[in-house]
Image: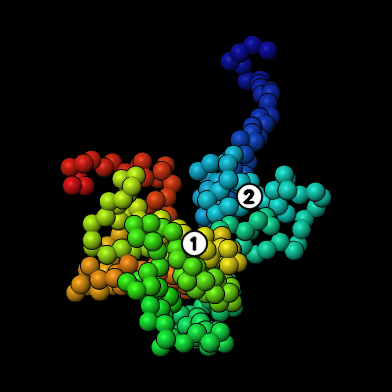
Amino acid sequence: MALGSNGLVIRRVKKIKKVAHHGGAWKIALADFALAMMALFLVLWILSVATPEELASIEGYFQDPMGASVAGYSANPIDLGGSPAKSTEKKLDLQLPESGSTDVESRDLRAGNGPDSADAKSINDMVQKEMGRMNILLSEQQNLRIEVTPIGVRITLLDDPDEPMFERGSARMMPDIENTLLTMSSIFNKVANPIVITGHTDSSRFSGSGRLDNWDLSALRANAARRILEEGGVEDGRIAQVIGLSDTIPYNRFDTGSAENRRISITLLTDEAYKKMLDQNLRNFGTPAQQSDLQLSPEAIF
């Protein structure tokens, strides 16, 4: 049929069905987002319920994943029953201690958890009671002082010119002071409080053999007291600090050369004081990696 005539023209259009593209990229993105949100809320929940020891353990892992953590626990980020090196059975141990996943307690957990370690008053009452049982009268012990301080109970042994505690210019103890410390050791074993031992001298300048001075002398005498206490049964893990303070903190401030300034102080710390001391030591003398981040210069410090 020719074009332009009155005949009917039928046009057939072939329709091609278009299929929409169903890619899976958006599903992967959504899954990643959901996983990230779950991890975020899981971390926030852990931070809200974790104890300070557990937080220190987590911090230690991220500082050194292959080494021991700060708090002394397992270096594994996810621990389901103990370190693989310690575990003999591949099963979940439901009897784990609450504060960690290993049976070895860190030094800060071994001390200060006794039943009588909460406050200084209870410690002082116990010391007084035990001394009464041993017939040790404070009125007759002029060189022995027991004082309640903000950090605990302090037992101070003062020097006596007539009955000195140490040989002059030496850390060698006299037999009487050794016996006194051995007697006190049995009293200290009644509680689990951490112990701080400090040695002090008077203001007299001392220069002994081997170029020793008052700093050396006070430190050596404090350490000698520590050894005697350990011989008496005090565990080494309970010793929190051993310090030599020379003549910087005189007992008699009006006569710095007085004999009573030559002394040994033994302090039974309360739990709160011990934790504060640990936190302060960690901040002042802790991880070098954290301290090296500080941009300090001699001009800024001095």
Position above or below: 52 against 90: below
Q: Which residue is at 42% across, 42% downward?
A: 289
Q: Is residue 30 visible?
A: no
Left or right: residue 94 compared with residue 291: right
Q: Which residue is at 62% across, 58% downward?
A: 105
Q: Nearer the viewer, residue 160 or 79?
A: 160
- Can you tell which of label 2 and label 1 is closer to the viewer? 1
Point out residue 107 in the picture as x, y percentages from the top left corner.
56, 58
**Disc 2 element:** loop
Nearer-N-terminus badge (2/1): 2
Q: Are marks 2 and 1 in contact (CB under 8 Å)?
A: no
Amino acid at pointer 1: Arg
Q: Is residue 176 visible?
A: yes
Check disc 2: other Cα within 10 Å, few if <14, some if 14-19, many if 20+: many
**How much space separates mark 2 and mark 1, taking CA atoms?**
31 Å
Residue furthest out toward the top: 2
- Residue tagged by mark 2? 74
Residue 226, labelled with which disc? 1
Q: Which residue is at 34% across, 44% downward?
A: 210
Q: Nearer the viewer, residue 112 or 197?
A: 197
Residue 133, labelled with which disc? none
**Disc 1 element:** helix
Q: Which residue is at 68% across, 12% downward?
A: 1
Amino acid at pointer 2: Ser
Point out residue 88 in the picture as x, y percentages from the top left corner.
80, 48
